[in-house]
Amino acid sequence: MQNANPLSTPIRALAALLLLGAAGCGDRKPSAPAADALAPAPVYTYEVLQAWPHDRSAFTEGLTWVDHQLLESTGLNGESTLRKVDLATGQVTQRVRLPSEYFGEGSTVIGPRVFQLTWKNQKGFIYGWPGLEPAGAFAYAGEGWGLTTDGHSLIMSNGSNQIRFLDPATFQVIRSIDVFTQGRPLTQLNELEYVKGEILANIWQTAYVARIDPADGRLLGLIDFTGLLPAADRDGHEDVLNGIAYDAAGDRLFVTGKDWPKIFSVRLKRK
């Protein structure tokens, strides 16, 4: 018999992981969910359109498509970088290394500036674009996980169900939204990408990406990327799905993972 509610299985599979981070992610009590947050979200799957090589040693934390190339930030103490990557070959064309005390996290570009978070140092770095020359630093409260932009604000995750919008000039919090799924905080929100008026967020330690309404945090859907990296491309050293970029001009959505050997262009479809 076909499951009468095909959404229940992915929701149950996520529940244990999503609730793990609820108690320890920041000191702010999340707001109560809106009434429509109690309903199950639609689930989407994907079709792979194309694949390209990706550096197996890149512990991907942030991914952005800008000026016909990928800008990637990578993590791990002593290995964190900000790098330009040629999509066709996977080759790193320029690299900036972070001091070993910093664990690099999400990054994004607004105009002539690149912003990069670090995990626990409550410090972000600013670089010029396209040269990646150092251009300052900024502070924020709590952990830094994912970073994207709507062209006006820095949009930042911290591993909880909260997403904050920061002024890119003052770095003050303008507003924040809380994300719920069926009444539960949807925690572990990680790498972010702003796509066609939505925020896409990797859910750490899962194969899921959340589609989020930036106005109020409403969960618009879940994308199930199970099986995206084929078994033939695995050698046992891969880490989790993480890394989303969008080419607006070409309408291409790119997805990869930490230490994955490939990056994929995908099309979404309802499951």
Image (spheres, helix red, strand yellow):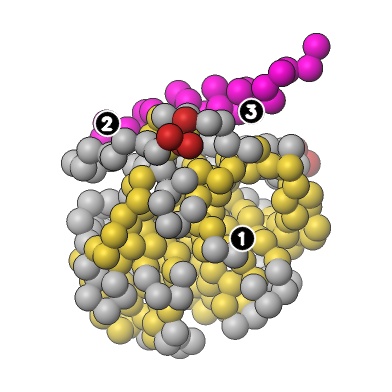
Residue at screen point 65% across, 71% down:
247
Label 1: few (<14), some (14–19) or many (≥20) C-alpha neighbours in 10 Å: some
Mark earlier in primary sequence (1, 3) = 3
Kindly identify which residue carries mark 2: 23
Q: Hey, which residue is sitting farthest front in the picture?
A: 35
Establish if 69 lies above or below 106. Answer: below
- The spot of residue 243 in percent (x, y) is 55, 56
Q: Residues within 10 Å of mark 2 (few under 14, many from 20)?
A: few
Task: Return the disc, 2 or 1, that comes first in the chain's sequence.
Answer: 2
Q: CA distance from mark 2 to mark 1?
A: 35 Å
Which quadrant does the N terminus fall into? top right
Residue 264: x and y in percent read: 71, 57
Mark 3 Cα-neighbour bin, 10 Å: few <14, some 14–19, many ≥20? some
Contact, CB < 8 Å: mark 2 with mark 1? Answer: no
| Residue on which disc 3 sits | 7
Q: Which residues are magenta?
A: 1-24
Q: Secondary structure at mark 2?
A: loop
Q: Which residue is mark 1?
A: 55
Q: Is residue 9 magenta?
A: yes
